[in-house]
Image: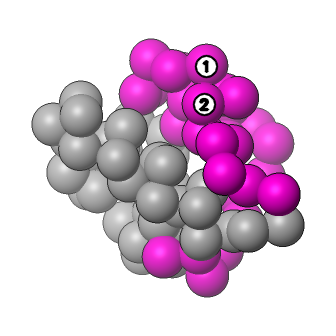
Amino acid sequence: MNIKALGLNIKAERNRKDLSQAELAEKVDLSTTSITAIEKGRQIPNAINLYLIAKVLEVDINELFKGVD
């Protein structure tokens, strides 16, 4: 799986919503460090966190998987 693509998609959607990493982290109850690691492809979010991220970003969860093999 291309974890970096997932992270880049999350980052792109976060930027579209004009949210900082800290704001997203607070809304999904994660640390800013975790959001940074996810966006850089160093950490894979679990299913619950991925669902929460998609919900906060107001995107279908499948959109976050574009380009992820």
Residue 3 shown in magenta: no
Using the image, determine if residue 24 lies above or below residue 56. below
Q: Amino acid at mark 1?
A: Asp
Residue 67 shown in magenta: yes
- Magenta span: 40-69
Quadrant location, the N terminus: bottom right
Task: Tell me the residue at 75%/38% (across/down).
Answer: 48
Using the image, determine if residue 20 lies above or below residue 66. below
CB under 8 Å between discs 1 and 2: yes
Residue pointed to by mark 2: 63
Q: Amino acid at mark 2?
A: Glu
Q: CA distance from mark 1 to mark 2?
A: 5 Å
Task: Tell me the residue at 60%/30% (across/down).
Answer: 63
Residue pointed to by mark 1: 60
Q: Residue 30 placed where, x, y %?
A: 50, 55
Q: Which mark is residue 38?
A: none
Q: Pick whichever, 63 or 43, lies toward us.
A: 63
Q: Residue 3 placed where, x, y %?
A: 69, 68
